Amino acid sequence: MASVTFPQREPITAKAPAVRAVGILRHYGEGDTTVHALRGVDIEVAAGKLTAIMGPSGSGKSTLMHILAGLDQPDGGQVWIGDIEVTGLDDDGLTALRRDHIGFIFQFFNLLPMLTAQENVLLPLEIAGRTPDAHWYAELIDTVGLGERLTQRPSELSGGQQQRVAVARALASRPTVMFADEPTGNLDSTTSGEILALMRNLVDSFGQTTVMVTHDPHAAAIADRVLFLDDGQIVRDLDACDAHTVIATMKSCARHEARGAEGPVVAPRAGHAHRPRGGAGRCDGQRHVHPD
Amino acid sequence: MVSGTFILTDTINKAFDSIFQDSYAKTSAVISGREVVKDAASGNATVPAALLDRVRADDNVAQASGAIFNLSGVSDQTKLIGRDGESLGSSNNGQFGFGFNARDERFNPLSLTAGRWASGAGQVVIDKGTAEDHGYRVGDRIGAAAQGPVQQFRITGIARYGTVNSIGGATIAVFDVPTAQALLRKHGEYDAIFVAAREGVSSADLVRDLRAQVPAAAQVKSGAEQADADSKDTQEGTKFVQYFLLGFGFIALGVGAFVIFNTLSITLAQRVRELATLRTLGASRRQIKRSVLTEGLVMGVFASVLGLVLGLALAKGLNAMFQAFGIDLPQASTVIAPRTVIVALGLGIAVTLIASISPARRVTGIPPIAALREGATLPPRLSARRPSVPLTILAVGLAASLAGALGVFALGISMILVGVGALALFLGVIMIAGRLVGPLARVVGAPARRFGGPAGRLASGNSTRNTTRTATTAAALMIGLALVTLCATVFGGFGAATRSADEDAVSADYVVTSKSGFDTIPATVGAAVARIPGVKAVSGVRQDQAKAFGKEIVVNGIAPGFADTVDLRFQEGSAAVVPQLGGSGAIVNEGFADDHGLRLGSPLTLTTSAGRPVAVRVAAIVNPKAQITGDVLLSQATFDARFPRPSDLFVFVRTADGTSPAATAAIDRAVAGFPEVDARTRSAWLDFRGKDMRQFLALLYVLLALSVVVSLFGMVNALVLTVFERTREIGMMRAVGMTRRQVRRMVRHESIITALIGAGLGLPLGLVVAAAMAGALHTPFVLPVSSLVIFTIVAIIAGVLASIGPARRASRLNVLNALHYE
């Protein structure tokens, strides 16, 4: 679409990461009962790519995403989105950041029941007091595939359709990064597949930087890069891989984890032959953190 | 409120009881005039002074003393005049003038704290409370006035009434008997003769003995009996206060029931899954219902106990409020009767239980499967299932109101019809409110949508999400707003009616009345004004109570030229009879004539407040529009000859050349000697006539404000629960960039919209009922535009106030926790 007039932000080049985090620490509680959710995580999310963060329950993946998105404050370390330092912003600054640079997709859609699909999509723009860009909006609705559903309310839509509305809402303001928290967690497998395809498509056609937290191997399989988190640390870092690889990687983590309970920790080699670029790390934690 | 009312009135009664017991502590028997009418303008009936000698001659009497001592306090007052020429205290609180013989101190209910008793002309003893409040000491000079202009007295002593420093803001002046008789124009009369029995004679024996000797117009009571009789009179007054306040207490209680009902419904709606889970685990419907009712009971007990404690504080607050409106009630130590506790707790618990019946019933409709469903809701209420029920009630209400409004029935029946109609309308609107919320929210939400930004638009949408809840919340506020609208409109109509009637009927240039407007003034005031050069005619309207056909009636004595100043609207006979009434002619009111079958020439016998008969014939029948005169009008000469201590309610003045500054100054000078008398130009008087009504309306507003406050709690509750319920939603909106301010604004707008829905329901409802009442009462219906605007603003303020807490809570939600809130 040549006539797109939406004010483009600084072009994000491959060199400048969309999201960068250094030495993120997060713990809950005090003294003996302290639970370390994140033990010094460094991460760089490439612009225009889909990055998945995987890990078992309590691995700290959700906490990491919350901190990256400015929803939660780390106990140590720094986070940048684009060239804005997220850590150190006050509530107003964070609100502005979320409004201008971040889009969210949630597991439970979180649509407002009294608004139509269209009103839900445009809600963030309305809150920000901006007028939607007609061309971008049309393109977005077309891509997401909501055409005839726009005047319906969430209660009249299926789960998959509701999640499409949520995706459109996240992208309405053309955010620097879109964060997706278990986007398929509340959907059946067919619908999951459709939503994942949509997300992949958004990355491919719009270059939408996306960070997705999931424990669904099929979801992780569409990513350009998969980070495995366990016990508050990144234990694997894989480039695009299929669901098999993801499952296998997770199993290997789980095995080590089980072993870790009995004896000294052995740092494993990268798991699988046809994906040799798995990052080194440990899968030794017994602690299961439940920050949520 | 209920417990506060009981505590307040019990306390007042106790104070009065102790006052009256003190009054007759050392008295075996009291001889007083037999009461013909209550609260006569001329004061209590008296006994002739000659009776005292006969009583003293009785063998059983050790000591007897005649006194001027009238505690009824409504009329027959003696005002103490301060240094600035204004009277101390107010006629509402009693301004007593007593005459006691200094030698017969044993009968005097007051006891000296300084100086000595008054024993001669120009001497006075005043009560300690007044002395302290206004800085008077023994030896100071003070003015006093009763049935004449102000006279100066020297204070010879300060005294205390019984054990209390003052009687609820009253002022007391004690003179010697001849001085009091002169001041109150009771020459040769006593209010009471106090008698002490000789040793060995019981007070019952003495009373029996004396009864045989006193004339028929006098009565004898033992001291204790007299105290009981006196306190019964005042208790009737307190009873009125009690019913009046209780009425408002019940309104607040009704609103409270709504709030409880709504809160319970909301909390239960949130627990649908939990309750359904209980059902899957084998709990029966009955058990679930009982658990809800038990919850209601516990809540009711807790709240009632709290209410009882608050009632204590409220009793003080109510007293302060009455003081602010110029009514000082006597106070003793606070009385909490067992009745107060039982009624307050009983009512509180009962109301809570009743309010929880409907939610409890609905809860039983939750199927066990609801445990597994996302977003299961409570089954709807009966009225929501069958819309015909509220519609029928509304139709009945409208029909009854309309029938009453047409005014074709007798006033009593019309009012009952309007009352029943009003109740049905209230009930119907409350039941159907849920259906009106949608359209109303669209209307009252328009400003929020237009000017409130996205927050306003979201708030507008939020307010219609659960229409039943919004409706119940708004309905609580609606009740209060409907009632104030009703009062404002009805009283506004009354005011307009009084004013136009007065305007049409009265053509005087000046009107002289007491400062309060309803007390009478000495007849000498009119004479003083008549002496002013340039005054063409003075027409005093004497007034007193009398008895006829076994009922108390109002009798006036009118001057020959009365019909020139006031239009009486003669139905039979003509204005020509006024100067020719003579000693036997009477003009009667049409209503009075109809009630008793009187026609021109019918004989009529009245009994004056002093017990004397007056026989007259009907010379004319009138139906005046303005409320100036009473049931029967006599010539002034006849009135003055038959009624004790004649006094005027109005003095109408005509001057040679109308109203002028010079004439105003001259008349003001003429009445300056009389405290509590005001001369007003016709237009100033017309304004003044509405003053009491406006004050009463203000009192009603204050009391109704209570129910608005209760509904405010309901709004806060509903909002808190709404915020609670939408936690995740708010978290999402914050996540997509909503600022804290926007969140606060959203909650605030929703609250305002709810309040405005209450106003949108309440104001029209109040107007409809007021219109029906106006029809039944034949008063004009005047749309109180400015009041309606004010009430709407009050509703908005209520909305803003209610939202402060919940809005803050919503804006401070931790985004992350909110997002993960289930």
Image: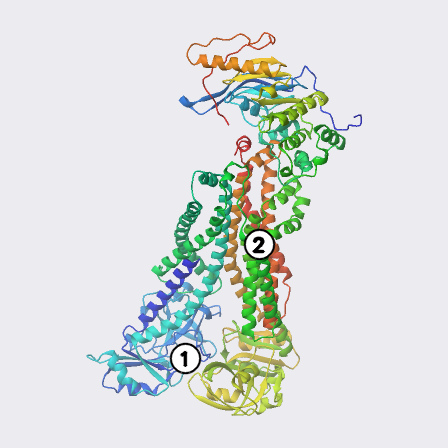
Mark 2 on the same chain as mark 1: yes
Q: Is residue B417 left or right of residue A285?
A: right
The foreground one among B747 and A262 is: A262
Q: Which residue is pictured at 60% across the width and 28% down the height?
A: A188
Q: Bin the neighbour count of mark 1 within 10 Å (Cα to Cα): few under 14, some 14-19, many 20 and up.
A: many
Q: CA distance from mark 2 to mark 1?
A: 62 Å
Residue B470: % across, % down: 57, 48
Q: Amino acid under label 2?
A: Arg
Residue B659: % across, % down: 64, 76
Determine whether the residue tagged by mark 1 lies in a helix, strand or loop: loop
Above or below: residue A209 compared with residue B537: above
Q: Amino acid under label 1?
A: Asn
Residue B3: % across, % down: 40, 58
The residue that disc 1 covers is B44
Callout 2–callout 1 Cβ contact below 8 Å:
no
Label 2 is found on which chain of the structure?
B
